[in-house]
Amino acid sequence: MTVVSLPAVGGSVSFPRILSGLLMALMVGSLTPVAAQTGPVSVTLSEPDATYDEPFSALSGLRELSDGTVLVGDRIDQFIQHINLANGTAKAVSKQGAGPGEYDTPMGLYALPNDSTLVFDMGNNRFLVITPEGRPGDTFMPTLETGGGPGARFLSPPQGVDAAGGIYFAGRPMRMGPSGMPESIDSAAIIRYDRASRTVDTLGLAKAPAMNIQASGDQNRRELRIRPAPMPTQDDWGVTDDGRVGIARIGGRKVEWLSRDGRRTPGPAFAYQPIKVSKADYRAWQERMGSSMGREVTNGRSRLVRIPPPEIDESEWPEYKPPFPAGAVQVAPDGELWLLRSRPGDDPTPVYDVFDGAGKLIRHVMLPEDTRLVGFGRDSVYLVRIDDDDLQWLERYRRPQ
């Protein structure tokens, strides 16, 4: 296995020079056959080439623009900022509110063509378009038009957006049972919404997490609580600019690509060393659940609420962790799929497996301790470093090629 440590972009040693020197060493000093050197490369991100000096509470979306500046959203502090990491300056994009061009709780930023950006505003249950000039534009909410009138609404953040304007959602992992109450199902649809025609099509299915559904009350007042089972075994997926869908399949432990016309390209299975669930995993999962947001519906009206951490019976926990956690997939601008590995609850170092467009594992990328991947640029990887006070600090690294 070849190991490469990436220096900062501004360092004195360039990445091509490292590769050149490494290749020379292999040619001169190794008797290993060339075929043995074709496996995935391991890369460690070392020092950032740029950092932002103000912390975030919960960075919930990032989008790099063509000039290298970034738009970022914070779901707790409820703002969107345009940040220049070169000089450390930032300015607000619009303001919090429910009026035209305003937003409440940004939960995702997605690249549209020509430096436009799509924001999923969970607080107002709609999308906001930010223009290339950094000003707020149209707001809308995807609906499926049925019989000339509005039909089903999409209430969750999308999994991705393509350059043609398609917006991709995960279908609900539930259906209405014979009793009239929702019940969990094994698979959820991969849905593409077309903004021009206001229609959806289903591209395929992905294994869905098992849901714990509890109902109480009577016909006049009914309370429904739905939460995923802890550490569920589920597929995860993302979308490329050209509309291909990359799916990490939990069952066969492989990455499969779906083209726009539905053709499947499954990759080979990847290795996984089972990891036992520990007490540290219990605590980490409950902390994540405690910081989640959801919607409370009363008499047909909904509002955004913070979901308290659930009490989980020990019998609900699996013995082993799945190969990758929920939300593990991110897709880079060049179409590489980054898949976060599962790791022990007390391990602070995230590691991503990187797959190409054929589903082949080409790289392992080790992030610094206590960091989280939040987005990509053309040549960059953006992380947040989480300190002891749970504040998040934005850092930019060179993306390994």
Image (cartoon, rainbow, N blue to C red):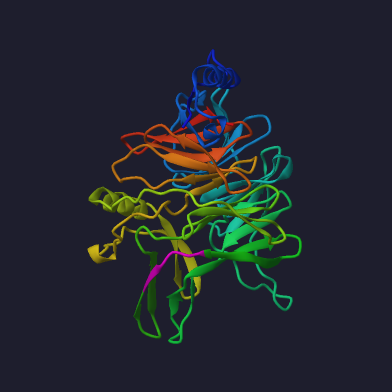
Q: Is residue 69 above or below residue 169?
A: above
The reply to whether residue 78 is visible in this rendering is no
Q: Which quarter of the rendered picture does the C terminus lie within?
A: top right
Q: Position of residue 124 (x, y in %)?
A: 55, 57
User: Which of the 4 image quadrants contains residue 220?
Assistant: bottom left
Q: How many marks?
A: 0
The foreground one among 96 and 386 is 386
Q: Could you tell whether 142 is left or right of 232 in the image? A: right
Q: Residue at x 48, y 35 (%)?
A: 365
Furthest residue to the right?
Answer: 196
Taking depth in this image into account, of 392 and 103 the one nearest to the observer is 392
Q: Is residue 261 above or below residue 180?
A: above
Q: To which quarter of the image does residue 200 belong?
A: bottom right
In this image, 236 relative to 332: left or right?
left
Residue 7: say if magenta.
no
Residue lying farthest top? Answer: 12
Q: Residue at x 59, y 34 (%)?
A: 70
In the visual, does 159 lie left or right of 208? right
User: Which residue is rendered at x = 51% and y = 37% of the image?
Assistant: 40
Reply above or below: 61 against 394.
below
Q: Position of residue 100 (x, y in %)?
A: 64, 53
Residue nearer the viewer, 7 or 220? 7
Q: Is residue 381 visible?
A: yes
The magenta stretch spans which residues? 207-213
Q: Residue at x 49, y 46 (%)?
A: 339
Left or right, 47 with respect to 334, comes to left
Residue 68 image point, x, y percent: 63, 29
